[in-house]
Image: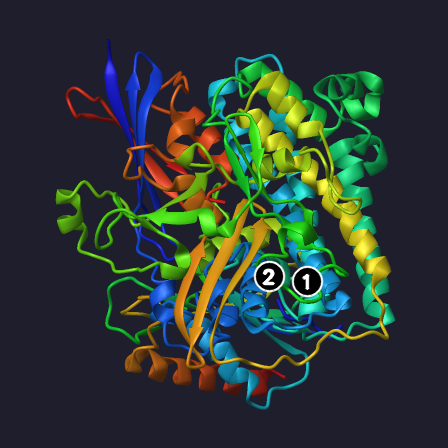
Amino acid sequence: MSLGTGSTHTVIVGCGNLIRGDDAAGPVLVRQLADRALPDGVRLIDGGTAGMDVAFALRGARRAIVVDASRVGVPAGTIHKVPGEELTDLKPPEGNLHQFRWDQALGFAQWLLKDEYPPEVTVWLIEGESFGAGEPLTPAVQDAVNVVADAIVADLTVVS
Amino acid sequence: MTTMELNVSPLGQVEGDLDVRVQITDGVVSDAWTEAAMFRGFEIILKGKDPQAGLIMTPRICGICGGSHLYKACYALDTAWGTYVPPNATRVRNIGQACETLQSIPRWFYAIMGPDLTAAQYSSFPSYEEVARRFAPYVGTSYQTGVTLSQHPVEIYAIFGGQWPHSSFMIPGGVMSAPTLSDVTRSTSILENWGRQWLEGQWLGCSVDRWLENKTWSDIQAWMTENESQANSDLAVFIRWAQEIGLDTYGQGYGNFLATGTFLNPDLYTNPTVDGRNAALQSRSGIYANGQYYDFDQMRVTEDVTHAYYEGTGSRHPWEGVTEPIDPAEGAKQGKYTWAKAPRYDVPDIGYVPLEVGPLARQMMAARPDAADFQDSDPLIKNLIDELGPSVMTRVLARMHEAPKYFRNVQRWLKELDLHGEFYVKPTEPSSGKGFGATEAARGALCDWIVLEDGKIANYQVITPTGWNIGPRDANDNIGPMEKSFIGTPIENPDFPVELGQVAHSFDSCLVCTVHAYDGKTGKQLSKFRMGGG
């Protein structure tokens, strides 16, 4: 987790393993955003594979934006913005700290943070194709990362 | 005689999975096979890369022990390059390593052991209601505070390391960190708050100092009834419960251990070398086999691939190690059954034996005679082993006992930091060399071996604690440490073999599995049971 400032209102978390091919979409996106001009009060987090810690990092933010890779069998680079109604009442995971998926991390965060859970949560999923150790992002996934990064920046500028 | 097989099989996800088949005869586990279902090719990725690539890559192997991976990857390079590491940098590295483990201790106890401890199967035992009230996942009173407060130790890591996990702030020659007085003050107050609220307030029910006075099992028994606060602590409740449901009677394993030790002495390891490491360790390394202690010598470590999906048979030292994966279907024809190599240690006069790593191993080494003044010398857990034998219960107690010990360590290192001193000295970077770095992750010994040639990584081998514990059979058909510890476990209800969860979780391997119960004679699947990894 990176260190936040006292006035963080938006937390952007990239989840996934940086060295497992397309699973790196989230962390790569967060690194790209770090090189761009963002409004004050935005905190970027490389959530890596530490799901439980993602939940702690959301404490007290007004907005949370989570980016993760998916593997549901659609073409690589397919972008999915999870509808808000899918994000209420998520279930925390059972007995496993290594493999929190984004929905489990948010479910855990709802349990953990209670009133301090961000009122506004957006989840972007980018479909991956190849998850081999040490592989780069496949081109379609890299393109999708750029598209999502642009969408997030545009959205931040409007709201902030 | 009734024989059945319980098959623990994988869930395909990113970090790697474990598949355990267990054969049950007359209600007791009679044989076991651990099968790592995923190939992790980190060694192959690192070959030919910049020498420092291990600092970036290996902390990504695990989302739980990233700081431990960084600690040992850094020492592998320190020894290969012959760096100078200022004492302050060693203190900061030690603080990072210890804080990561401090975070892991309550999380593991409540989130990993908790669901097993409160399994419905135990509901007829007298203390069930009290145990469930405290430890039931998400709703238990102690679960809630223990897990909620668990974040605090790694906040200290983030103060020094910028982030946790996956930080790369430890570098050859020191740390990329210039702590200020307010960083140290903040860290100290975070640590002490956590100590007061969870460690003393909830877990021990007494001061850290009072707990550390316990040197024997009978001391612990007296401690449990000394006053109401201690009797009502989570720790005392756990000990009574463990005995009530029999966690002191199974999960033994070999009772032979290996620790690579950790926490280098800041003043004695300013010029890290492979040979000088043992003497500079605060938390000592060593081997305990067949009742004897031996010095740890990394040259005696090998990895055996006879039963793993790699080219060939036999074993090699990691500096000569090769990672040449083969098609599992081909491997199966040669009696291979896992992606995990079998780490073995050549014990003098005994030969290559499987050894358990983890908190129990570390605390056995802490009891070894003839410690130097600065080294941890602590007879408690060895006494438990002598009195009660290894078991799920003693394994859990060894890990939990480290919380007060590490808490004291971090307090001391924070005090000793000299904010005006050096934290980094730029090393020269010889283009060739060999290095060895090791530490103790929460779940056990973690080592890197590196070979540099022409300014690039020529060979890189990692042996993880999960590798030591879940490794398969070797060329001599010695079964692995965790395989061994399943044997003898009584299975009350094959439809819900919670006992296997207790054993697996007491090792806290980094892998996730699902248990399938099979009748060994008919091959019919009886049940399916998922066990979470650490």
Side of B158 relative to B439 (left or right): right
Specify the quadrant of the image occupied by residue B219. top right
Residue marked by disc 1:
B93
Residue marked by disc 2:
B71
Q: Where is residue B296 in the image (x, y as percent from the top left)?
A: 55, 45
Q: Kindly identify the amino acid type of the residue bearing the numbered disc 2.
A: Tyr
Specify the quadrant of the image occupied by residue A8. bottom right
Which residue reaches farthest front?
Answer: B349
Position of B263 relative to A2 (above/below):
above
Side of B369 relative to A18 (left or right): right
Q: Which chain carries label 1?
A: B
Q: Which of marks 1 and 2 is nearer the N terminus?
A: 2
Q: Position of residue B372 (x, y in %)?
A: 76, 44
Q: Position of residue A156 (x, y in %)?
A: 57, 83
Q: Kindly identify the amino acid type of the residue bearing the numbered disc 1.
A: Arg
Element at label 2: helix
Which residue reaches farthest bottom?
Answer: A37
Q: How crowded is mark 1: few (under 14 residues within 10 Å), some or many (20 or more)?
A: many
- Tell me whether circle 1 and circle 2 mark residues in contact (CB < 8 Å): yes
